[in-house]
Amino acid sequence: MAMASQTVITVQPQFSATQQPGEWQTGLLDCCSDCGVCLCGMFCFLCLNCQVAGDMDECCLCGSSVAMRTLYRTRYNIPGSILRDFCSIWCCSPCALCQLKRDINRRKAMGIFW
């Protein structure tokens, strides 16, 4: 009687519901890393605001809000807090919005933006 070859699985694939901690793709003050976004943020803040909101399928008025930044940060598991998001928006709205747009652009380029 011939025995069939058996495959023994020693390690099962695992699914983890927890994401690895993420990072911002650029810093809050890294304006020189994308001058186009920086110029748009400084001279046409509302345009950039609408671009960010559109990228995230939200209302055009929400792009530079604390809620939008917090939503994005939690979506990509970027460490921080609502207070830190508030302080970033309050102290330097253009820089915070530019950071968000740069991050969206880089994640789109890497194919990991959703």
Image (cartoon, rainbow, N blue to C red):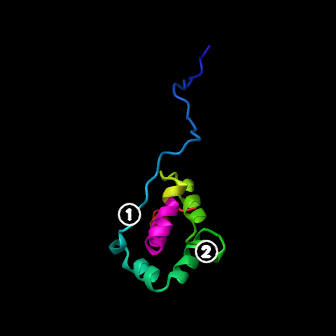
86 magenta-colored: yes
Is residue 97 shown above or below 73? below
Residue 36 circle label:
none
Is residue 7 shown above or below 84? above
Which residue sits at x=55%, y=77%? Answer: 49
Position of 67 with respect to 93 (left or right) is right
How far apart, in angstroms, are the residues tagged by discs 1 and 2? 22 Å
Which residue sits at x=54%, y=26%? Answer: 9
The outermost residue toward the left is 32
- Mark 1 Cα within 10 Å, few/some/many (few <14, many 20+)? some
Task: Looking at the picture, tell me which residue is in the foreground, 41 or 91.
Answer: 91
- Please say whether residue 104 is visible from this viewpoint: no
Task: Looking at the picture, tell me which residue is in the foreground, 107 or 30.
Answer: 30
Span colored in magenta? 85-105
Q: Nearer the viewer, mark 1 or mark 2?
A: 1
Task: Looking at the picture, tell me which residue is in the foreground, 14 or 47.
Answer: 47
Is residue 45 shown above or below 97? below
Whole-percent x, y for residue 89 in the image: 50, 68
- Quarter that holds the N terminus: top right
- Please say whether residue 31 is visible from this viewpoint: yes
The outermost residue toward the top is 1
Which residue sits at x=41%, y=82%? Answer: 39
Residue 27 circle label:
1
Q: Amino acid at mark 1?
A: Gly
Which residue sits at x=36%, y=68%? Answer: 29
Q: To which residue does mark 2 refer?
A: 54
Whole-percent x, y for residue 56 in the image: 60, 68
State the image quarter where residue 75 is shown: bottom right
Q: Amino acid at mark 2?
A: Gly
Task: Looking at the picture, tell me which residue is in the foreground, 92 or 113.
Answer: 92
